Image: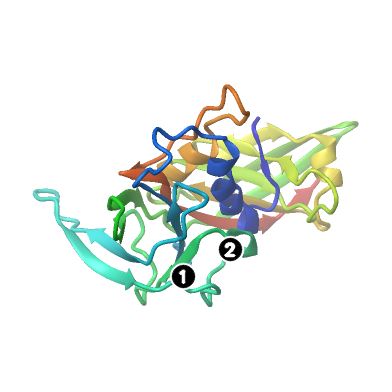
Amino acid sequence: MRRLPASLRSLVVAAAAAALPACDLFYPEPRDDRLIMMAPLNPDGATHLLRLGPVSATAPPPPATVRMYRRDPRPEEVSWTLVATATEPGGKCLGYSWGRGFYGYSNTYCLAPGAPLDPGAAYMIEASAEGYRTARGRTLAVGDFDVKTAVLTRTGSSALLNASWTGSAGAHRYFVSLRRKSPRNENPRGWYAEVDGTSATVEVPEYAIREAFGPLRLDVAALSEELHAYLTSGTGGSRLSVPPVQNIENGFGFVGSMRMRSLAVESR
């Protein structure tokens, strides 16, 4: 099982945003004309926060225009409809729920189309700035779902979690995790399990139970394929670093979506 920052609701995309700079990536030119774009679309709300900045850490963030498009659902043709535009950074992005850890890197833009995303629909984010290539990324908006069961059976020193949930349209994988206390002065990484279906039967380590909030709650996160690939790939290090899988054309970073639902855990 891989390890991921513990609070999925507030930290998963902060971890994604930190992953690209942390990999000590080598870019081909010191004056690269590409942008880094981090766009975690928020299917539970009408506001979508996007971070945008130049590859060079010394270059000032350029004024940019960010656009969101929705793909026409008709299969016989490929066309995109503009649904939102942002031209100025907005530091607070009222109503946004991905967590405070996402702020503070380059320019932060707020896209507010006025309505939640359509489940399973394809969206494209496009960012343009003078002197830089136009960056684009696409993803599916994950749909709503419900957690149906969450039972933790403890036998001696072992614990077995049995959980199930309904399917989320557009979801590629699911992460399950016990909701954990926010750590202080310690490694903030916690236990989680990755699932490619709508149920899980997994062993839970004792430390995950010990570090969880009481009463126990199970968090299930549905992730788009693009966000899942970005979060679960790449390695850090100053020499043999490998960048995470990215889906930005003419740039770096990701466009993806995630939705989380939870349920109280029944202990036996």
Left or right, 233 with respect to 30, comes to right
Q: Which residue is depicted at the point 31% across and 53% down?
A: 132
Q: Quadrant of residue 151?
A: top right
Q: Which residue is depicted at the point 61% across and 63% down?
A: 99
Q: Position of residue 79 (x, y in %)?
A: 14, 56
Q: Which amino acid type is shown beneath numbered disc 2?
A: Tyr
Q: Position of residue 19 (x, y in %)?
A: 57, 42
Tell me the crowding category of disc 1: few under 14, some 14 to 19, or many 20 or more residues within 10 angstroms, Cα based: some
In the rendered image, which residue does mark 1 sit on? 45
In the rendered image, which residue does mark 2 sit on? 103
Could one spot residue 29 in this view of the protein? yes
Q: Which amino acid type is shown beneath numbered disc 1?
A: Gly
Q: Position of residue 107 (x, y in %)?
A: 48, 64
Q: Is residue 65 above or below residue 217?
A: below
Left or right, 39 with respect to 125, comes to right
The kind of secondary structure element at disc 2 is loop
Q: Quadrant of residue 125?
A: bottom left
Q: Which residue is depicted at the point 59% across and 23% down?
A: 239
Name the residue furthest right.
156
Left or right, 126 with respect to 224, comes to left
Assign the C terminus to one quadrant of the image. Answer: top right
Q: Is residue 28 above or below residue 92?
A: above
Name the residue furthest top.
240
Q: Which residue is depicted at the point 63% across and 29% down?
A: 237
The kind of secondary structure element at disc 1 is loop
